């Protein structure tokens, strides 16, 4: 399998796997920090970035097969890996298969939702992608100010106004409902459930990082993740939403380096529960507000012209 990728730094190889509707640019805020101590390889998965789509089905299973082939073809089998969102589920799946990856850091993985969380995930992400697709011509202006970033990243970031404008623009340029995006989103929500791994099966370090303010993969889903992967350790990002590499880049870098060099120390037990979202209305309202504001912006812009 041929994949487009960028490679920076020297040292022990480290694979970075982005999420749905993204590319290797998802790691822009942390790749240079990681490259000071690692040989970092950030891929574009099939159907995203500069890598063409698969000829058949696009799913977690087929993407896992493609990554496995890519690593074998480039003599990288056994590489340490980090994944984000859908990519986080992908690296967990590869860890479950065994013999593909070394140490794994999984950042806010998808696939551990249940009940109402499934349609909540599917429809909120689908609507967001449709909105972003419609707004492509206006994105430079919308992402160029904190208010626009706050509206567009409300579901994905704990502090969207702090995301650098060029990074926000790049992220949204690829977050559009392409055929590969749509097929993969449907597979994530309605396809095969994530299988687990019995205790003792995963021999390499596996740390699941989760933002306590994640409104895509809700923090309570960590319970199912740990029940399916009892060998994993859970690391909370107190001030992060769905993307720690955007919200708390320095903390994300340190976690990745600690896990992959074998020095990670588990967080002490904490008494407070993760933020729970009992009803999805708050996020859906946020998406609705973004739609309305964006519509007004475009209407005023068209009228002025």
Image (cartoon, rainbow, N blue to C red):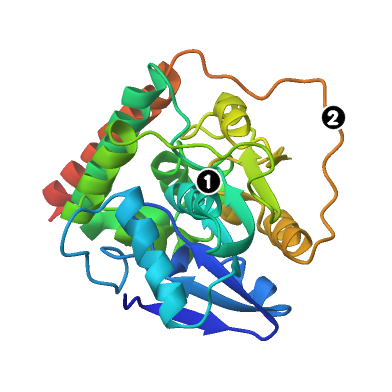
Q: Residue furthest top?
A: 278
Q: Number of labelled discs?
A: 2
The residue at the point 77 percent across, 20 percent down is 272
Q: Position of residue 161 (x, y in %)?
A: 54, 47
| Vertical position of residue 167 compared to residue 3: above or below | above
What is the crowding at mark 2: few (fewer than 14 residues within 10 Å), some, or many (at least 20)? few
Query: In terms of secondary structure, where does tag 2 sit?
Result: loop
Q: Is residue 294 visible?
A: no
Residue 222: x, y in percent?
Answer: 60, 30
Which quadrant does the C terminus fall into?
A: bottom left
Q: In the rendering, at what x and y percent does residue 145 appear?
A: 45, 53
- Asked whether, in this view, residue 195 is left or right of residue 59, the answer is right
Residue at coordinates 72% horizontally, 37% vertically from top-left?
238
Q: Which badge, 1 or 2, comes first in the chain's sequence?
A: 1
Disc 1: CA contacts within 10 A as few (<14), some (14-19) or many (>=20): many
225 or 36, which is in the foreground? 225
- The residue lying at 26 percent from left, 36 percent from top is 127
Looking at this view, is 81 or 65 the one in front? 65
Which sits in the foreground, 41 or 232? 232
Q: Quadrant of residue 126?
A: top left
On the picture, is 40 further left or further right than 232? left
Q: Quadrant of residue 115?
A: top left
Judging by the rendered image, the residue that carries numbered circle 1 is 160
- Check disc 1 and report its element: helix, strand or loop: helix
210, above or below 245, in the image: above
Question: Can the viewer see residue 52 in this picture?
Answer: yes
* Residue at mark 2: 269
Q: Residue at x 54, y 27 (%)?
A: 221
């Amino acid at each position: 399998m041929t994949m487009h990728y960028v490679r920076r730094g020297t040292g022990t190889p480290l694979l970075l796997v982005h999420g749905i509707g993204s590319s290797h640019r998802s790691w822009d805020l942390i790749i240079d920090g990681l490259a000071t101590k690692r040989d970092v390889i950030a891929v574009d998965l099939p159907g995203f970035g500069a890598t063409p789509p698969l000829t058949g089905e696009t799913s977690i299973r087929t993407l896992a097969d493609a990554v496995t082939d890519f690593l074998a073809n480039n003599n990288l089998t056994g590489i340490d890996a980090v994944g984000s969102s859908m990519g986080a589920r992908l690296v967990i799946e590869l860890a479950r298969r065994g013999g593909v990856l070394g140490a794994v850091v999984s950042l806010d993985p998808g696939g551990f939702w249940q009940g109402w969380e499934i349609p909540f995930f599917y429809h909120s992400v689908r609507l967001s992608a449709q909105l972003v697709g419609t707004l492509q011509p206006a994105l430079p202006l919308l992402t160029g100010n904190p208010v626009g970033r706050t509206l567009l990243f409300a579901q994905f970031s704990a502090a969207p106004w702090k995301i650098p404008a060029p990074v926000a623009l790049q992220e949204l340029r690829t977050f559009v409902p392409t055929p590969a995006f749509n097929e993969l989103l449907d597979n994530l929500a309605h396809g095969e459930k994530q299988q687990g791994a019995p205790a003792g099966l995963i021999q390499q370090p596996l740390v699941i990082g989760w933002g306590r303010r994640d409104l895509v993969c809700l923090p309570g889903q960590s319970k199912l993740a740990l029940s399916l992967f009892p060998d994993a350790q859970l690391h909370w990002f107190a001030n992060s939403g769905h993307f720690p590499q955007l919200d708390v880049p320095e903390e994300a870098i340190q976690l990745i380096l600690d896990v992959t060099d074998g020095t990670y120390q588990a967080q002490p037990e904490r008494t407070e529960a993760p933020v729970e979202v009992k009803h999805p209305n708050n996020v859906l309202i946020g998406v609705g507000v973004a739609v309305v504001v964006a519509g007004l912006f475009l209407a005023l812009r068209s009228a002025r012209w």
